[in-house]
Image (cartoon, rainbow, N blue to C red):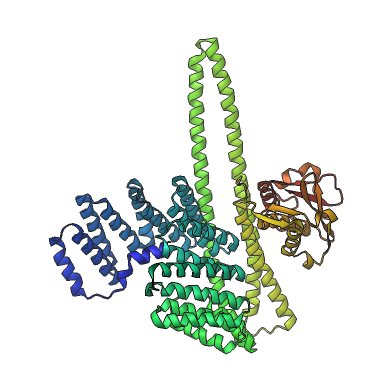
Amino acid sequence: MRTIKLTIILCCICLQMSASTIDSLRQVLPTLKGNERSKAYMKLSQLLSSEDDVQAAIDCLDEWIAFEQDERNIEGEGKARWSKVAVLTNCALDSMLLEEAPVQMEWFKKHRQWNHYYDTWDSKACVYMYSSRIQTALREAQDMLADAQKKDDSFGKAAAYQLMGVVYESMGQYDQAVDVFRECIKQLKQRESEVEALTSVYDYLCQTLDESHRYYEELDVANEWEQGILRRMQRKGAFPELHFPTYIACRCNKASALAGLNRIDEAEQEIRKAEEMQKACGTPLGQYRIYYVRVHYALAAKQAEQVLAYCDSLEALDLNAGGDVSAYRGEAYMLMGNSDEAAKTFRNLYYQKDSVFNREMRIQLDELNTLYKVDELKMQGQLDRSRFFVGMAIVLVVALLLTMYLRHIAASKLRREHELLKTANARAEESSKMKTNFIQQISHEIRTPLNVLSGFSQIVTKPNVKLDDATKKDINNRIIESTERITGLVNKMLELSDANSTTVIETDDNVQAQLIAQQAVEDARMSQARHISFEMQTASEVESIMLHTNLRQATRALTLLLDNARKFTKQGNVNLRLEKVDGMLRFIVEDTGIGVPESEADHVFEEFVQLDAYYEGTGIGLTVARSIARRLGGDVVLDTSYKDGARFVMTLPL
């Protein structure tokens, strides 16, 4: 949304104009009136921006805003204010934009210019996202969505959904990103004028599906996108050149999906169609996309030399438009059997990624700490206000002691408020402890795999160190394990943010209960757990039962229960049974591990609880599993009658 809008408003910035043209506009500007003067201000600000004279452009825009105020032209003033936001955004003046955005948003809100209002909000949130303050960007997107839903503004909802999708995609949360991108498309289809924005979201959705290797879905989305382009073309009676870049992007995504499905010949046809359009009316970005999908195609076709050639072409364009060319080079060298060059490439890539990861991790930990302190200040303010009102109530009680009736009412009120205050204080103290424990636990969990990665990095980079193949394999496995551990930890942190939600999960899937169990077993990697013996049992009457539920969420809840059983069983058995009881389907996860004391049956489902600190984890798996099950109409409980380990039962309605 942000990229499309800013491109439309500032499309003339790319025009190269001489200094004499700018001087001429400045001379003629005072002689112009009304709409002609407004156009001159817009043109002058664009020219100054294109000449990198940003301060002069901002001064020009402030002068334009003042002119429209004098003219009492609300529409013109809105254009001028949005142009200022656009210049600050395109010139990457982030600190100025963060100061300016709230001022302009307040003005747009007052004058009900909702498109500019939400676009400005989007620009502010993107500053946080691109500076790695991901949680703040996500909060902004969620607040924007709540605001737009309250106003029932489809444009605002679409902008919020797109922003959330981009944030989720950057965090590697592809399922969530896909869901909100689809919601964004649904909102934009209600607005015929938002063709460019719809194109942008289709592109984001295709690329996210490609990243998560969901090639069939990517192909369906690309076909839907193409049909929409053709329908617009038929309404206009011709295919305007303006839509060529859109069609090129669509073809490239389609080709990438076909290459991922190993339908090489069809992928080649789509690439050639994109190349024909690029020759007719293309852009450097369009050429970048074609080269990029050519790399995918060449990798799928095992054409290593072609991969390297297209990587050279991508780097020559120097657009930095996404994608990791170095990784593709490394894969090409591996295909060619050039292990030394591949190792060198991947090592350099690792150093780059490690540097970026460490910088972003520091930023995000600082961000979490800042958000934590803000929440603490809010809580303290609420407590201070509570104490103030309690004090006022006590004064009132003393004053009303003149009569027995009023004394009785005052005493009752005082008791109630006293209990409320005790409850509030207890909750505040518990919340503070939970947050402190959470930050300490997360710091420990992140530090351990990072230390592993750091240690092995020092080993493999030490001069003159020769390692045998077995040692190299062991180091590689440990690096992969540590990386996956960090990724899993971040995913659990994100899941926790949704654990306390009371929102009912949509149940639009008709799926076999046995399929949920099989997918959960695969996701939990039970077959790879060598320290346990795993068995799944399905009662005969359950094999054909269909559930009306949410496949992804139900699978995730059961996966968390299986993960829990595997982790807390050092040596022994883990069993999964499916039974039908009283209109509910029961998924019973039973292990012979350390078990759970009966006194901890409810406590074990609380956030951050770990009954044995020796085991790795953050103590949120059971919390998330029960939250999901309850929002699907079921529950997760601990069977305290089982004494040989732990038995958790997840129920879902039929």
| Number of residue marks | 0
The answer to whether 478 is drawn above or below residue 265 in the figure is: above
Quadrant of the rendered structure where residue 613 is?
bottom right
- In the rendered structure, the answer to whether residue 558 lies left or right of residue 220 reads right
Q: Residue furthest left?
A: 31
Residues 452 and 21: in front is: 21
Q: Residue furthest right?
A: 644
Residues 140 and 569: in front is: 140
The answer to whether 289 is drawn above or below residue 563 in the figure is: below
Horizontal and vertical percent for residue 490? 61, 60
Q: Residue at x 76, y 44 (%)?
A: 600
Q: Does residue 619 appear in the picture of this structure?
A: no
Horizontal and vertical percent for residue 474? 73, 76
Horizontal and vertical percent for residue 164? 51, 58
The answer to whether 144 is drawn above or below residue 41 in the figure is: above
Q: Does residue 508 appear in the picture of this structure?
A: yes
The answer to whether 343 is drawn above or below residue 130 in the figure is: below
- In the rendered structure, the answer to whether residue 303 lies left or right of residue 531 reads left
Residues 313 and 414: in front is: 313
Quadrant of the rendered structure where residue 255 is?
bottom right
- In the rendered structure, the answer to whether residue 606 lies left or right of residue 40 reads right
> In what quadrant of the picture does the N terminus appear?
bottom left
Horizontal and vertical percent for residue 551? 68, 57
Q: Residue at x 58, y 25 (%)?
A: 416
Residues 387 and 3: in front is: 3
Quadrant of the rendered structure where residue 575 is?
bottom right
